[in-house]
Image (cartoon, helix red, strand yellow):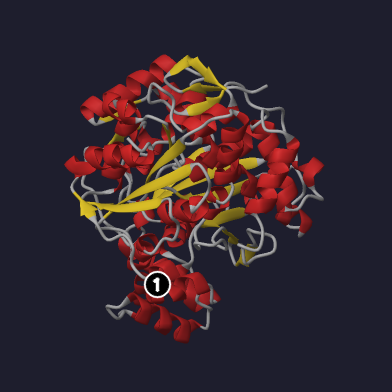
């Protein structure tokens, strides 16, 4: 049975269920599979729909869940909440394909994992015969927050608290979180950026003060640091590949390139795990916006957060500390936990680290990188609408720019799939301004005008936001964060 170990100490080993419940390892590392599952080749999956694919892939990684438990989780997650029958439709473009990952309840790719994570966590809770409450602390750069709030709303034995950066998220993203339903949810704005939110969550996980407060409460996370968030994302890489085979666009075994708008590195790491599992992935193109820390790293081997932070029209990528990169370093260094521990300590103390030329070369065999300016992003939105009548959000636009800049569309004559991560209506003002040159100040007026201009329907879950009551409008200072978490935990533990 596959067990999970910490990226910073291979001796910390737990079951899949324990890894899902904990989120982070006790030493602050991220859980990775100690060994990869047996290969899963696409030939054996050609007749599978999305739900069957999910069952097969999840079972390969999460072996201590029974087949019946996983089947129930998959059926509950991927149902009528998604407005596309095949969950993640593939759309043809003139020079590639769009994998539309935003047809779930909150109109972002995070729904794929965050509709199933609550079921995985609840099952693990029951199997472990736990009592008390799982306190799920979550940082968001925009989309994870609402998807996690929707996924965990009123789930028994859980309570979720989300922290988002007060400045940076779109008006619609903020409203999605502020109007969240559920008796077990809490939301705070933080007077900082996403990295501040993420740092707060990680510090809380290792804080003795927090641990002392956890009476009848256990901590976990819904961020992609949780292996239960990461594994479900592998599924849609297989789905896109099989769709291309079924459509006659490639022969089984032919390689495909994937272009991924990347902030916290989880989405693209799922593609890397798909490749390690046996999917014929050629190149993974890491697309960054103006916060191009990952582009520099993948080109030079130097990772430095000692740089300006830019608030962009693609806020879910406004991240300087990409947590899941730690998992890649561990896996590509063949489990060198001492190296990872040293690099993470250097990042914490010095704000940067540099990997060896040999390790960089290994990583570059799979990964390419490109970045897009705000002007590049706007131009891609406008171009794709005018030339192909395809409406995309700013994050997808960053990836479309990277597709062309990296040459991935032409490399080896491989098909190139761009991951489209959010509905354009979550960023109506930016999309409308990119197409027309101007936009009203009100986000809902932007929605209406974009709909009038393009005829593309507004997702009902976004349109109704203007009529929902705001429940959570409190913003806290960074230094207040730990006190807020302690109070929340004590409330949950009835201390």
- Name the foreground residue: 161 vs 268: 161
- Name the foreground residue: 97 vs 483: 483
In percent of the image, x 50 and y 41: which residue is there? 157
User: SS of the residue at dot 1?
Assistant: loop
- Name the foreground residue: 366 vs 178: 178
Q: Quadrant of residue 18?
A: top right
Q: Residue tagged by mark 1?
A: 468
Is the residue 352 above or below the residue 294 in the image?
above
Is the residue 215 above or below the residue 146 in the image?
above
Q: Quadrant of the C terminus?
A: top left
Is the residue 92 above or below the residue 127 in the image?
below
Residue 474 screen position, x and y as percent:
24, 57
Q: Is residue 465 left or right of residue 285?
A: left
In percent of the image, x 42 and y 41: which residue is there? 136
Q: How many marks?
A: 1
Q: Quadrant of residue 428?
A: bottom left
Residue 143 screen position, x and y as percent:
42, 55
Residue 174 screen position, x and y as percent:
34, 62
Q: Is residue 411 visible?
A: no
Q: Is residue 115 left or right of residue 294?
A: right
Query: How many residues crowd mark 1 within 10 Å: few (<14), some (14–19), many (20+)?
Result: few
Q: Is residue 5 left or right of residue 288?
A: right
Residue 201 screen position, x and y as percent:
33, 38
In percent of the image, x 61 and y 38: which residue is there? 123
């Amino acid at each position: 049975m596959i067990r999970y170990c910490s990226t910073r100490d291979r001796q910390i080993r737990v079951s899949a269920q324990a890894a899902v419940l904990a989120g982070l390892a006790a030493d602050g590392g991220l859980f990775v599979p100690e060994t990869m599952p047996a290969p899963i080749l696409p030939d054996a999956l050609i007749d599978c729909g999305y739900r069957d694919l999910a069952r097969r892939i999840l079972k390969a990684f999460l072996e201590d869940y029974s087949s019946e438990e996983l089947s129930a989780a998959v059926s509950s997650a991927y149902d009528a909440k998604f407005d596309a029958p095949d969950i993640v439709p593939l759309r043809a473009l003139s020079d590639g394909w769009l994998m539309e990952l935003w047809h779930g309840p909150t109109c972002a790719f995070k729904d794929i994992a965050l509709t199933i994570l609550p079921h995985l966590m609840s099952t693990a809770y029951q199997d472990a015969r736990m009592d008390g409450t799982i306190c799920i602390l979550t940082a968001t750069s925009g989309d994870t927050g609402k998807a996690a709030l929707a996924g965990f709303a009123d789930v028994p034995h859980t309570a979720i608290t989300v922290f988002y950066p007060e400045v940076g998220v779109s008006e619609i993203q903020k409203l999605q979180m502020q109007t969240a339903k559920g008796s077990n949810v809490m939301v705070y704005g933080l007077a900082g950026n996403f990295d501040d939110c993420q740092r707060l969550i990680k510090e809380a996980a290792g804080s003795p003060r927090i641990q002392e407060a956890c009476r009848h409460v256990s901590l976990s996370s819904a961020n992609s640091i949780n292996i239960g968030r990461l594994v479900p994302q592998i599924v849609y890489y297989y789905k896109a590949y099989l769709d291309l085979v079924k459509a006659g666009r490639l022969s089984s075994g032919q390689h495909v390139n994937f272009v991924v708008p990347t902030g916290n590195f989880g989405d693209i790491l799922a593609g890397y795990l798909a490749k390690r599992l046996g999917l014929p992935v050629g190149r993974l193109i890491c697309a960054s916006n103006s916060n191009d820390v990952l582009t520099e790293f993948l080109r030079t081997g130097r990772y430095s957060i000692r740089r300006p932070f830019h608030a962009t029209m693609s806020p879910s990528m406004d991240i300087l500390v990409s947590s899941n990169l730690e998992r890649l370093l561990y896996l590509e260094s063949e489990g060198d936990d001492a190296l990872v521990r040293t690099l993470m300590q250097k990042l914490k103390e010095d704000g940067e680290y540099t990997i060896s030329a040999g390790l960089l070369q290994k990583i570059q065999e799979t990964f390419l990188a490109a970045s897009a300016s705000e002007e590049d992003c706007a131009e891609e939105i406008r171009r794709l609408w005018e030339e192909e009548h395809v409406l995309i959000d700013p994050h997808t636009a960053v990836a479309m720019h990277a597709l062309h800049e990296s040459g991935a569309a032409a490399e080896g004559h491989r098909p190139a799939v761009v991951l489209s991560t959010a509905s354009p209506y979550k960023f109506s003002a930016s999309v409308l301004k990119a197409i027309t040159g101007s936009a009203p100040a009100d986000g809902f007026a932007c929605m209406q005008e974009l709909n009038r201009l393009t005829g593309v329907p507004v997702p009902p879950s976004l349109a109704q936001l203007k009529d929902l009551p705001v429940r959570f409008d409190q913003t806290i200072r960074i230094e207040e964060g730990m006190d807020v978490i302690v109070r929340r935990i004590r409330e949950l533990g009835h201390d």
